[in-house]
Amino acid sequence: MAVNPSASIIFLDGQLGAAINLATNVAMLIGAASGGPLLRPVYCSQPSTVQQFIHGPLVANGGHHTTYSGPAYLMRMNASTLGTIGSVTKTPATSSPTSYGSLAATLMSYTIHGAIDATVASSLALTNAALATGWTAPSAPLPVTVVAGVGTVAHVLTFTYVDTNGDTQTGTLSIAAAGTYTTSFSVASVLSVTANVAPVGTQTYTTTYSTPGDRYEAVLYTISGGVIGVTGGTTPKVQVSLDGGRTRSRTLTMDSSGELELTTYAGGLTPAPTGILLTLSNATALASEMFGSARLAGATVPGDVLYTKKVSSAVTVTHVVAGLSTPFSVGVVGTAITVNSATDAGGLATSTANDVVAGILGSVAASALVTATAVGAGTGLIAAVGATGFANSGVSYTPKQEGVQIRHGNPGPSNATISVAVAGKLVTVYPVTDANGIQTSTATQIETAVNASATASLLLIADATGTGAGIVGMQNTYTALAVTAATGDSYSFITTPPTFTNVDLAEAQAVLYANDTALDSFSVLHVIGDATDLDISTSQTWAESLETQKRKYKTIYHDATYMGSTSESTWLASLLSDYTPIDTNPYVGLCAGEVNTLNPIYATVDRRSVATAYIARLMICSMSELPSHVECQTDLGIQGAVNGVVARTGSTVTSALWQNEDNLVTLNNSNFVTFRTWAGRVGLYVRQGLMFTITGDDYMYVTNRRTANAVAAVAYDEVLKNVNANLLVDLRTGQLAEVELQRIESNVTTAVRTIIMGGARQHISGVQCVLDRGTNFQATGEITGDLRIVGRTPATSITLRLGYVRSIGA
């Protein structure tokens, strides 16, 4: 019969065996972060995807890795050891006016809902209606703190919220009475809250960081000086640095409150919170007093004496006329000046105003407190006057801008009106004077005139002291008014980062252990943060368990203790004594020392453990390529110096790294991973890619560890094919038949040669699988043997002998 013509394609499935995923160039980074999924590995291919973890050591390392190496898996782990904020050091400017500013660095707090007042709190319906909406999200997942006011009754608040993993959850907070209460859970955002009974007392709702987000060398630089807390004043303009001044933010204008949330400042990226609030305030009041005067009347006007105070203390002056034939004297007790007039035999004063002026000038103690001026000719006799002070005659001036100077000038005799002259930021106030040139304007009158001046009032605020009824003083020189922050002032402090405990590490590794998909996705694990010797042991045990229980083979790197401000010799001795090398089959490496590391997410050059840049270099190297190769053959081509790090520079810098070369060589000799420089080369290099073990161990070099891990995975996959297979035996001995032995040996050897020695790079020099003969396989069913590999060997020393010869032979 006829057949209808056709053509077709039939898809076959199952023709290809599953490929072995060695993940040799993928790392898993685990560490602390302020947000993002917790204990969930996340694939990140670029810095923007790293930012879902918001901020912290994990983010800094992830941003560097994805920029200078490639994709990696990131997993946020718990960090039960909180970071700290160090004390703030102020470095005043050398050429600007005095500044009274003080900077406080504290943990940042956010109000996430409006307060519940007593009226609302008295009604359950009103309370729940108010708490159903109106919540703002904190900058990172944080616990909620509720402050319950006086009269609060016992009740329970039920929160519906989004957690750090993005899942909607419910949680409760029991409130017994007035006081402060904090949830045991952290919220990325609150959806709603309900109370089971009316609270009665008022309530406020805040979230507060418990730790700074990372390690910072924070500096606040004053770019343009100004004042805080002054109505109409110009606030300082500042720049912030998170890395000790190696980079800076754009210029920021301080809020009039003096508060500034410290954030990252990478251009084009959303600023990330550090968890720190900077508060600039006045440690001393900014008002500077122009000291006033007091006119003590004599027997006649030419006997009057005008005193002008010179110090801030409460000075008093007393004129005494007493006794018979008393000599003239000036006495000072504390800040009380007593002028004793000379008297005649009848007890009448014989001292003139000029005598008093001379006496004040002749007294070191008195002349330090006041100046004295005789009125008119000064030839009149003085009279007795009780203790007279200056409390109501001063005028305090508060600047609105940096650089303002003030004086009360002398206009000369018979000046009829108060005048205020402004030249730039120099303000001169001329008081009213009488025919003798003595000022008569009161402090209140000067205050009114200055504050009414259209130009002067832009520069300063005048405020009379006391009642303001006393007469003002006159000064020949300007007084520079102190500001909160002067141009050139800087404030610095250092933080420590949050980090994991050994319990946190074990928890994270247990999560990975149970996640076979995650385990198959990486070959190298970097645990970010200072490690203890116990942490090294924990990681080694974890890797051994993976080897024996799951036949998965991992290389792990830890950060050794950060040196920071510890003396280098003390730090070196501690590292050599605190860590115990792994003497057999090491899976763990330990990186020591710090290097200036580019952080694209913060836009900083951080002083970080060399582990950050080391792992980035390691993961672009093939398993058999040492990251310390001077001209490293990487996935990105030939690489010399390590990318993403910079040498230290400056007139006082003695080493390109944060530790000197001799100490780093000492650490290298104990198999810590360190960095170095090379004579004749620019940049920084890995000294050697090592595992933390004893010298001479087969796995001392990381290439041996990584290559052996890959060989083990390939060989395991091959021998697994023979498990539970019914194999031929030798009829005479019961041993496994030679044909079977040779087949398995050949298959294992071929698989390793194909995957490990084939392709673009031959990772080992040779391989041989040799199974044991002479055992009764028929009785035991066991097959044992050796898988022998000859690795590559690093050239650790090359020496050429140079010299002249008579001829060079053919």
Image (cartoon, rainbow, N blue to C red):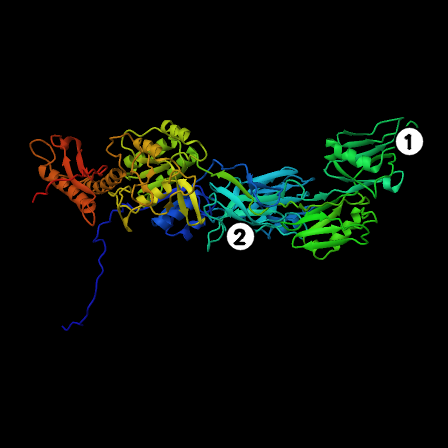
Q: Crowdedness of circle 1 by 10 Å Cα count: few (<14), some, many (20+)? A: some
Quadrant position of residue 297: top right
In the picture provided, is 347 more to the left or to the right than 172?
A: right
Q: Crowdedness of circle 2 by 10 Å Cα count: few (<14), some, many (20+)? A: some
Residue 541 seen in the current view: no
- Which residue is pictured at 72% across the width and 32% down the height? 364
Residue 381: assigned label: none
Residue 206 percent coordinates (x, y): 59, 45
In the picture provided, is 58 more to the left or to the right than 256?
A: left
Quarter of the picture holding the N terminus? bottom left
Name the amino acid type tagged 2.
Answer: Thr
Residue 731 percent coordinates (x, y): 7, 34
In the picture provided, is 244 more to the left or to the right than 779?
A: right
Q: Circle 2 sits on which residue?
A: 251
Residue 709 percent coordinates (x, y): 26, 39
Q: Circle 1 sits on which residue?
A: 348
Which structural element holds mark 1?
loop
Residue 218 seen in the current view: yes
205 and 640: which is toward the camera: 640
Which structural element holds mark 2?
loop
Above or below, 7 relative to 55: below
Residue 778 percent coordinates (x, y): 14, 33
Q: CA distance from mark 2 to mark 1?
A: 71 Å
Above or below, 131 relative to 174: below
587 and 605: which is toward the camera: 605
- Which residue is pictured at 26% across the width and 30% down the height? 695
